Each structure stands twice: as C-alpha cells, then as structure tokens.
Amino acid sequence: MPFGSHPLPPLDPALDRVAVALDPILNPLGFAAGQAGASGGHGQVIFCRGLVDSTDGGCVDLVVDVEAMADWRITDVRYWGYPSDRWHLPFDRHGDLPAQLSGLMRTLADELS
C-alpha cells in the first residue's frame, strides 16, 4: 500500500498574522518567509536565515513561540542556531498579539542587524 499523508487541520489565523507582520521586516535581513505550526495550544513561527552568520554550519533561525491563552500571545522570541547560544529578544510579554507584533515590527530590524 502506498504511503499517503494525512491532511493537517488548518492553522489558527493568528499564527499566519505573525508571519504576515514580520515577513516584511525579516525578509530584507535574509530570512525566509515564516513557517508556522501548532499543536495543543502551543505554536511556533520559524523564520530561517540559512547558514548566514552560523558558527557551526547549522541553520540560524528566528523562532517566535506562541500560546493560546484567552487568545494567542507571544511567549518567547529567540535567535537560534549558535552552538551554545539562545539569544532571547525583548518583547512586550503583557500585551495582546497585535500590540506584541507592533512592538516587534519596530525593534527587530535593529536587534538583528
């Protein structure tokens, strides 16, 4: 019997909003478009930068963790890919998702360049 993939349920639109908001900021810095995934009320949007600035030959990513509380909120933003480094970026932990995204849109370019 041939292998067939199972259809995945559609992602919550809030995860797409993270990618749509941050893609225009991160693409000019060499990051690929954000790719989202979620399960059980937790999700991630990952923006891959490839091997640029990698010290160990591995992929360098910006990872935005989100969690469904009363509504979706960002719980962590980290630059990932250095052998002994997880660089956590500052963001508004208490705002709602639109406020968090607005803040990241203002600060990410300076933080990552």
Image (tube, rainbow, N blue to C red):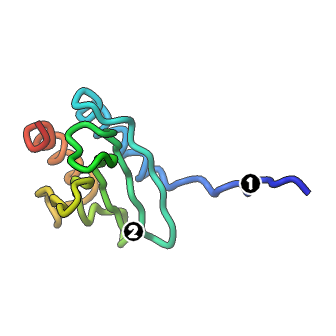
Amino acid carrying label 2: it is Ala
Q: Answer with the quarter of the image where residue 85 lies.
A: bottom left
Secondary structure, mark 2, is strand
Amino acid carrying label 1: it is Ser
Extreme residue toward the right, this view: 1
Q: Which residue is mark 1?
A: 5
Instruction: Give the camera-side residue of 59 and 57.
Output: 57
What residue lies at 42% left-to-right and 68% top-to-bottom? 42
Q: Which residue is mark 2?
A: 68
What residue lies at 47% left-to-right and 50% top-to-bottom? 13
* Residue 8 screen position, x and y as percent: 65, 56
Q: Is residue 18 left or right of residue 107?
A: right
What residue lies at 14% left-to-right and 56% top-to-bottom? 89
Q: Answer with the quarter of the image where residue 95 lies.
A: bottom left
Alpha carbon distance from label 2 to label 1:
27 Å
Camera-near label (2 vs 1) is: 1
Badge 1 crowding class, 10 Å Cα cut-off, few under 14, some 14 to 19, many 20 or more, is few
Q: Quadrant of the N terminus?
A: bottom right
Q: Are marks 2 and 1 in contact (CB under 8 Å)?
A: no
